[in-house]
Image (tube, coloured by chain):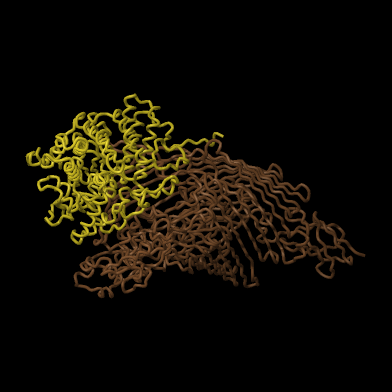
Chain colours: A brown, B yellow
Amino acid sequence: QNTIFRGTVTDGNGEPLAGVTVKFKIGNANATNTDADGRFNIAAATGKPAVLVFSIVGFTTKEVSVSGSTPIKVVMQQSSTQMNEVVVIGYGSVQRKDLTGSVSSVSINDLQKAPVKSFDEALAGRVAGVQVNSFEGQPGSAVNIVIRGYNSITQNNYPLFVIDGFPFENPTNSAVNPLNTLDPNDIESIDVLKDASSTAIYGARGANGVIIVTTKRGKLGAPVIAYNGYYGWQENKKRQQLLSPYEFVKLQYEIDPITTNSLFLQNGARTLDSYKDVAGINWEDQVTRVAPMQNHNLSLSGGNDKTRYSISLSTVDQQGIIINSAFKRNQGRFTIDQEESDKLKVGLNATYAYVDNYGTPTSASSSTNTLTLLYNVWAYRPVALSGSDDLLNLPRDPTVDPTTDFRFNPVLSAQNELRRNTGTNLIANGYAEYAFTKELKLKLTGGISNGSREDDVFNGALSRVGSSGNYKVSGGETYTNSSVWQTANTLTYIKRFTKDHLINAVAGFTAESGKTNIFGGYAVLLPNESLGLSGLDEGTPNSITSITSNYTQTSFFGRLNYNYKGRYLFTATGREEGSSRFLNSHRWGFFPSGAFAWKFDEEKFARSMSFLSTGKLRTSYGVTGNNQIGNFAPYASLNLSSTSGYSFGNATVPGVYASSLGNSDLKWETTAQTDIGLDLGFFKDRLLFTFDAYRKITDNLLLNRDLAPSTGYSSAYQNIGKVQNQGLEFTLSGTPVKTKNFSWDASFNISFNRNKVLALADNQNYMTSSQYWGDDWVNIPGYVAKVGQPIAQFYGLIYDGTYKYDDFIKTGNTYTLKSNITANGEIRANVQPGDAKYRDLNGDLVIDEKDKVAIGHPYPVHVGGFSNNFTYRSFDLGVFMQWSYGNDIINANRLAMESGSIYNTNQFASYANRWTPNNPTSDIPAVKGQVLKAYSTRIIEDGSFLRLKTVSLGYTLPGKFAGKLKLKSFRAYITAQNLYTWTKYSGYDPEVSVRNSALTPGFDYSAYPRARTIVLGINTTF
Amino acid sequence: KKFLNTTPTDFLSPVNYYQTDDQINTALTGIYDILGKTGTYGRYLFFEMDVADDAFVALPSWTQDVGLYNYDPSDTKINTCWALLYQGINLSNLVLENIDKSALTQANKNVAKGQALFLRAYFYFILTSNWGDVPLRLASTKSVNENNVPRTPYKVVYQQIVADMEQAADLVNPITAYTYNSRITKSVVWGILARVNLKMAGAPLRDASRFAEAKKWAGKVMTDAPHALNPDYKQVFKNMCQHIYDTKESIWEVEFSIKNGTQDEGGSVGVINGIGTSNATVGYSYGAKHATQRYYNLFGTNDLRRDWSIGPYTYTSSTSSVLIYYTAAQIYNRCDAKWRREFESSTVKFTNTSAINFPLLRYADVLLMYAEAENEVNGATSLAYNAINLVRERAYGVGLGLSTATAADLTAGMDKDTFREAVRKERALELGYEGLRRFDLIRWGIFVSTMKSIGNEITTTAPSGYTYGGVSGNNVSNRDTLFAIPSKETSLNSSIVQNKGW
């Protein structure tokens, strides 16, 4: 007689599990599946006890001995695969398998291997669809993060950061960048919300994507003390090759033989050849160094079932590879979670950080391109004229005319200039969660973020400003205080109605208010340099800065998740948001979204495919907003400034100027996004594949549009223009090899984004932008945004090499351009052999604005990352590679350093091969051969690169040895960051974008070089 | 809902400004401020944008610049100057629109309105003389949609300028109301009206009926206000260096302030021009404007103006102010020396800026305008002779006892054409380097030919180190009587068209 074994299978939460395979371990081929209520019955051939095996994807297979007819209860535990990870979404969290939107999680273990001061520096290449660029290599310099392409043309494209529930709109613009106040060691998880369904809950500020950072909190268990620390060295191995002393003097002779004869050749006392043996000064070696970097993090955490806590202290010190620059941080955190009763839970976390960042930015300058540090490093005269010519210690090259040339000894300038900001930041968040019933929970949260920063500027007597100029020894201090409070309160209702219907609803309310005060003073002509900034009171007061600003924002939102049969998932969200930045009827905006996901792995047809463990199709659509404009942008304004006054009869009177035209019609910029995604898991999710395709259309752009100067204003905000971004994202991850002693985990992602302008202001079909990097260049647009094309392309002339002798008619010793050959933008008669030649596109024989076209693409075709983790016994090896493909860079360094027109200016080594009568085939312009200021294809370079970004080799002490040392665990490692970069780019580093904006990416001029870092460190717990 | 009502805390709103005397005064000051920017009389309007035959740009490293007439419409200087003038126009319009709502007495309203009207007209005068047809905006910009405005024919612009200035003449105070000369007064308005009318009588409008108007306005300055020449030509400019206000001779100056050692409104007078030196005691000067041989030779031997306008010496670079005189052959070495920093009274002499004022209208100019207009209307009458001879007698130091009137006076009995040439020459001698030479040559219709000849002359006859100075003249072509419409305007204002030749 057959015995029927029956029972129910549930998951850890008591929810019935459908579709569990039930079979006998041995001797019986019968098998069945649980039904929708988790029930099963299976017939055994004999009445003997047996062992039943329960298995289903996502859960650990379970064996249960059965003997009688009593129904049995089986509880299955979820196996820990990626699909079961909890993903933090806005105002809640879900398991990855139940996600309807496009959310990527960053592998924290991988990220923490990188020896960087803050996590944003290690984010590049980790997540598909997230493009991360560090503008240059200076410690503390901002990192640009763009999710799924640029939406906004002139405004900020930075994603919204939510750190422990606290939203930060534009971290790089805060008094103290909150990202810089977090030690990467303290981070528990980073989740990136990309599609409209997941970001719409942040409505008005979700359009640029949302990055949710959750920090570590105390965990159940005995107290654990952990120490993580490393010490290492940073260095830039790449050198800009410059002309040798011989080539340098040769060049000077070509530019000005008369002066060179008296100066360098000392009227015959020396010859050109005598410079062949001169070593010269390598200015680059003088200003760069091997710089140490260290980080130490000590933490204590633990908890029982009622109380959990964590405390950590950390310090980081990253010296810059250029002298007198560094980033330092000291930080402390604590968190506590207390279960007051079954119904009430409260918690608090607080982070306090002190940040110190100094060093003159190498890429910034106020007006002329001869002021930037690296120009001075490269262009400075490399050879002494005589033994007494002490170039290294003189503030200026005595042979350079200070009236027209502002070059300054780069070593003294780096040593005697102070540009420093120090800041403290306190972020504190608290919450209280009250469960009315099992289904209904109220959560109240509130937080503050108070930052204060001090910016110090000091120019010593041997700095550029101090040694010349009007102000001599001068300096100033500026204090910025910002404080923001916010509260977010949600009511969550989770209920399973019948076995098939699960509802998860959230409704909430938020309010936020922030204010900023800036105050500073500047004094000049300080009599006592040795007092430093303490001596400001002795100088002549020069200017006082005083700025205040504030904003408020509030919203009501809701989200409904409906799960039918565990297979069909629906999400709808809506957020009504009001912002003080808009006026009247434009103040409020509504941002809805909807999503649907189909878990087809649960369908019958999929079950037959045993290799398929996860299959989910997702689709979503929604509208999100952006209000990233000044707090008072709609208002017309008049201002008084220290330079808007005038004097009458020797008495100075203040004057007003019209500072802003204002525009009371400003409203929300909106982005509508459609996303289709597919998640696949194979072989019990050992191999996972995620694909997303999206299209975003951003409308009513908040554009700081240029106005015709005849209006009396230079620009004003207006809602105009339309931009589209569309793209594909692929992520593949898995464990190709896993044996007892060896394992290999790999993760690969690649993303493609195409960006297109759909409309611009006033039916314009293009708009140009320029970089203010010096002199007249501000009026020479290097970028164009054309309708139907990306919002930024390089713009300029097509370089056609140099004029050759064939292009001229020779009469005596003068060369006259043939009448059918185009002049290069100069007066026709001035064009000579060897001069730069540009392509005459309209054939009118002159080079002018009409011959300018798009000459390069700053945006990459695809970017991505490839991460590998190998373990062999106690050894682990992490190898992370990152790339960017198909983007161009405008190497403006070459405009200054391959032009040979200014006397006594060194040039890049490549300029030795310039056109000369003896080298008449060269396409590098001759001396003084490039008069017209123009961007051309000559200086556009391929910026693609593949970088071996992080390589980390570690050894973990086996448990028994660690125990002997009274350690719970111990790991020692060596890590290299930016180990090697494959690129064709001729500058220091292809990951560069100084003076960056959506309209002006991929620009390189005097960018701080990027360091290669090698550190030795330990991770240990006690 | 009240939560979202934030109040701007950091700036003033134009809606509720323009109420009190102080506010109106501050608003007017904002308009005056435009005159003292680098883009206007702080530098460009008397240096890069006034390159003619009396001096050349002595910066051999320059290859491309508006001052070399080798530039394109994206040139920073023309862009900056244009934008500043329109900023001034917008600020004037704001005052004019709001003045009637203010709480000022009618008398004070009139004075304020007169100044705003005149300054707006003056900015348009600079615009139209340099660019021809320009957008005529007579109301403040109120919305981003007011971006595209076409050019108004220069004839209409001139009509507006004259109408506004004539109205302003009745509103502003007489010059006797002030002890200084940086305010707009009746004398300023009358004198500039004479200048505007002379320009209208010349190229490009060539409305000969305007000579009579010019004579009328210049005559008003001579009869209705207490003006006279300073007996010492040099003292006129030393006063500007020292902030001494001789309102008899110097009717209108741009004032650059000395404020407690720092200069919020610093100009380049005497710094970009002036006697080139790195001597900090004297005061740093780029000396970037050197005299041409032709200009030097134009002066009579005993003309005291020559060695004042054209510096006969330079300084040693060390601290002492020892003067080193040039040899007779060293003409091209000499700088525009009308304003010398050795006389600057500011306690601190800055490297890049000075506190030296710049003249916009001198009584000598009024006399010469009168002589020019009278000659065109009635021929070389005694009225014309009297006016020009006053200028010449001062130039030869008659008042200082250095010469007799007969020796200084112009040859009697000239016909109209000869007298015209004499006045033109006299303007060059008296008003050199005061930002008027290019303006004069253009209205006389001889700019292009003069520049071609000076370019050729320098290239072929200057010492080898200075032949580069011919570049400006050599580069001039017919298009250069006007500047290119700045690229910022042409690229953003879709209703505008570029000048001919660009």
Q: In this orientation, does residue A317 appear?
A: no
| B22 versus A51 height, above or below | above
Instruction: Give coordinates of residue B145: x percent, y percent.
Output: 47, 41
Above or below B182: residue A134:
below
Nearest the viewer among B149 and A81 is: B149
Residue B467 image offset from top left, x and y in percent: 22, 59
Q: Work out whether residue B201 can be spotted.
A: yes
Instruction: Specify the quadrant of the image occupied by residue A813.
Output: bottom left
Q: Residue at x 72, y 61 (%)?
A: A59
> Image check: A959 left or right of A69?
left
Quadrant placement of the N terminus of chain A: bottom right
x 28%, y 75%: residue: A277
- Residue A488 lies in quadrant: top right
Using the image as rendered, state which of residue B175 and residue B343 is in the foreground. Answer: B175
Indicate whether A399 appears above or below A642: below
Count how many numbered circles sit on residues in the image.
Answer: 0
Q: Compared to B398, does A185 lie above or below? A: below
Quick check: B143 left or right of B304? right
